[in-house]
Amino acid sequence: MADEIATAEPSTTTNTETLDKVVIRFAGDSGDGMQVAGSRFTDASALFGNDLATLPSFPAEIRAPAGTLPGVSSFQVQIADFDILTAGDSPDCLVAMNPAALKKNLKDLQQGGTLVLNTDAFDERNLAKAGYETDPLEDGTLDGYRVIKVPMDDLTKEAVKDTGVSGRSVLRSKNFFALGLLAWLFHRPTQPTIDWAQKKFARTPEVAAANVAAFQAGYTFGEATEAAKITFEIKPAALRPGTYTNVNGNTALAWGLIAASKLSGLPLFYGTYPITPASDILHELARHKNFGVRTFQAEDEIAGVGSAIGAAFAGSLAVTGSSGPGIALKSEAISLAFTMELPLIVINVQRGGPSTGLPTKPEQSDLLFSLYGRHGESPIPVLAIASPSDAFELTIEAARIAIKYMTPVLLLSDNQVANGSEPWMLPDVNALESIDVQFAEHPNGPNGTFLPYMRDIDTFARPWAVPGTAGLEHRIGGLEKEAITGNVSYDPANHQLMTDSRAWKVANIVNDIPDLEVAGDEDAELLVLGWGSTFGSIRAAARRVRLAGGKVATLHLRHLNPMPQNLGEILHRYEKILIPELNTGQLRKVIRAEFLVDAKGLNKVAGEPFKISEITEKIEEMTK
Amino acid sequence: MTAPSYTRADFQTDQEVRWCPGCGDYTILASVQQFLAGLGRPREEFVFVSGIGCAARFPYYMNTFGMHSIHGRAPAIASGIVASRPDLSVWVITGDGDALSIGGNHLIHALRRNVDMKILLFNNQIYGLTKGQYSPTSEAGKTTKSSPYGSIDYPFNPVSLALGAEATFVARTLDMDRNHTQGLLQAAYEHEGSAFIEIYQNCNVFNDKAFIQLTGKEERVHNRIDLEMGKPIVFDGGAKAVVMRDGQATVVDSSTVDPKAILVHDPTRPDPAIAFALSRLSHGPYGPTPLGIFRDVSRPTYEGQMHAQIDAAKEKNGEGDLARLIASQGTWTVKDPSSNGG
Ligand code: SF4
């Protein structure tokens, strides 16, 4: 099906410029449907064959007051004819559906960039709400941009008048008008959007018809009025051959959990409490009950992890998920799972903190909390997802470690990974390695006794003996356990032994972690080290530096505990080390402490990802 | 396979029981072990989950599967066990601090969801393990280490609380009365869904004789109101009776009322109002207090519905297919430029 997508016919009277990449931002009131417009534009581009990356941004309030700055919602997408790594620094094209959207986003638009404005929204009231004293359409504010002024309310009303929608529904199709206009401006295929609208609104045919009509009207408006002198085309990217889908991190993570359930043959149990930005994992999983998925929307965060611990004891692939504040509430229970040595996956989709912080913005400020944020000596494995398409594989990896080593595993994501999307080359599911599960079946001690803390000599894992298995009745708990028997023990030497055993077991996971490979110039003076969602920005910045003739090496950590075996050796090979992080320097602190290297930081907590330019500037400064 | 024949000893472990001598917990342990032995159900099918407190040591002494977890969370943990393995018999052992203070939220939600777990709340009206602070069921004004001027906390009535939390099975018994306890264990075991039993448990170290009105030789005949299905509620050797008056359960002299006006006990009434009224006859074991089953109604269980939804989804959409799932949002294919295919 995907092969037959038709390209839009290029307009004959306007000039077409071919670009290798373009960054577009849709901005409007949170009720204006900008997320839909952005994701439709993205999907059409994906089906057309561009590489792409997206970055949605929405207000924390569900319905902030209409027309105000806090109510602005936006969606940025970069499309390209080569493999890009981020959603781009600053847009080449901005769609602003009202004055507030213009005010909030104009500063980011490239000089000379294209601005699409809904002039109908620029009335006195909206200008005042956005804090404009004079009309930016008139006062010179927009000088230096290519401005396309469109009375979108009127044109949308006209377009949908015969479709049967009425009242407030009429203007809801405005986003499709804007989308149609951009489809014309950027030579996007139209059919995927039309097909999508018809399928999505199949139950309300009048809404489907209105959206399609508005979309086509937007397209025709561009063509007929030659709304811009130049239109742009971006050729398909030469991605690696394969079948692709466009996926965001939360969805890919949920699919990774389902895959791990299949690969291990264990039923998936997800115990959780709704929280932004992790809830979409619950929503996705709850849809797939035919995979045997059990979702449990608990009464609170603690019950979310508690139920998962119970499920793990009972032999499920047990998972709990949340974001920073929720993980704090789960902390005591995670230590319990750690000392009971039960397999458990704990997902933290990080957001801006502390406390409620910036619930809808990305930040990487829970690293130290993940590594150390539990009482007692409780080191647990920590993994961090690098990009939306990395989520599937790393989630399966988390399950594999949890089960093999009988331990909770912390899987870190963040708002940028969770809601951002990119093309993902679909893996061959039949080629995925199965996850070996060995439930204890027989007593392992003398005289038919069962010893729940008798460790495996290779992995140091204890046996997983699930209720219902005759002869394996045993008790586990939070009190310190005697080595081997698991009986309660207050013996000092035993506590030392058990503390060391648990730590050694987790440290030993390093044997399963592949060696790191340096990307870029191996012989550079500077190594840029990253973890989590900064992957794309760091790689893109390094590429830019190298294109300009500079030398730089990069390295990315997905395993934060234990860290790959050859990390120290690599770090010591470089004269200078830079660690960009969306926090105040958490990985840097760990690297300096563990490896005694003088790593420098580039740190930012502004509720947004790094701009590539911020990293390139720092690299240039350090390599001058 | 024939049912295993067990004695109480089969449910004992080799671990030394570490409650204070004379503690009511010993009696409850014996009742539970004896009851389970009598069921003849394979030992490995039982799971005991507890939180923190004196009562929470209980699983260590039961030769079944067990977990001594963290404070207050046992109902949440048990929910995960039941949802994963509805075939098991899952029991929660908790205390008044564990269930009603730190774990109050989990208790009420497990009850409202009707997850098939049997919750035994050992109520001694005191914090024992932390050595004697007032608990959420201690009487107002109680003088303890943490309330030298008397507690200003108004106590919970656990039975009222459970009824208010939409529990489908609510009962109350006494540690000392092993027959009564075992009768309720049997009824709870047979009940499909969550069952809540408040067990008055004497802490002879920090709150001795808290239940003397119900256990003392002299006192108990006057104060113990036995609730029995289908029987008029009378006590004190027939001298006293319970009637409904102005929407309230009220104790009257039997001689002063028409026998037909005496409330006949029926825990299966769909509406919990009368069960609740009975729970308000006393706000603690300080005078005439009902024992027995307050409520026993049937409602679909949480795990039953969860698995029914899973089965229905498999029936409708077929067993999940991973390859189809990951391609479900639309795909496109990039062809190998070296091949002639495209
Ligand atoms: S402190 Fe009280 S409840 Fe705890 S074991 Fe001693 S007597 Fe029993």
Image: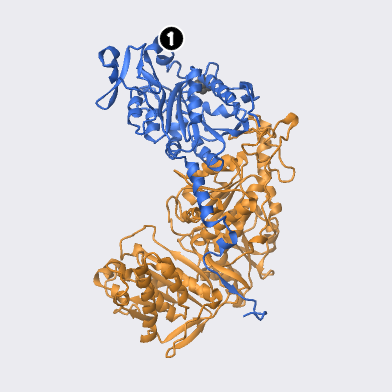
Chain colours: A orange, B blue
Q: Quadrant of residue A574?
A: bottom right
Horizontal arrangement in the rendering, residue B105 relative to residue A242 (left or right): left
Image quadrant holding the C terminus of chain A, namely bottom right
Task: Respond yes or no on whether mark 1 lies under 8 Å from ligand 1.
Answer: no
Task: Decide which of A515, A181 is in the foreground and name it.
Answer: A181
Task: Decide which of A372, B201 is in the foreground and name it.
Answer: B201
**Residue A531 visible somewhere in the drawing:** no
The picture places residue A607, in percent across and down from the top left corner, at 45, 61
The picture places residue A137, in percent across and down from the top left corner, at 30, 78
Asked which secondary structure carries label 1, the reply is: helix
The picture places residue B224, in percent across and down from the top left corner, at 39, 16
Q: Chain of mark 1?
A: B
The amino acid sitting under disc 1 is Lys
Give the answer, above or below, for where A412 lies relative to A375: below
Residue placed farthest to the top in the image? B218
Horizontal arrangement in the rendering, residue A524 relative to residue B151 (left or right): right
Horizontal arrangement in the rendering, residue B337 relative to residue B291 (left or right): right
What residue is shown at x 32% (from left), y 77% (from top)? A159
Task: Decide which of B241, A170 is in the foreground and name it.
Answer: B241
Give the answer, above or below, for where A91 lies relative to A511: below
Q: What is the crowding at mark 1: few (fewer than 14 residues within 10 Å), some, or many (at least 20)?
A: few
**Residue A167 visible somewhere in the drawing:** yes
What residue is shown at x 32% (from left), y 71% (from top)? A99
Task: Decide which of A84, A214 is in the foreground and name it.
Answer: A214
The picture places residue A484, in percent across and down from the top left corner, at 70, 34
Image quadrant holding the N terminus of chain A, namely bottom right
What residue is shown with label 1? B217
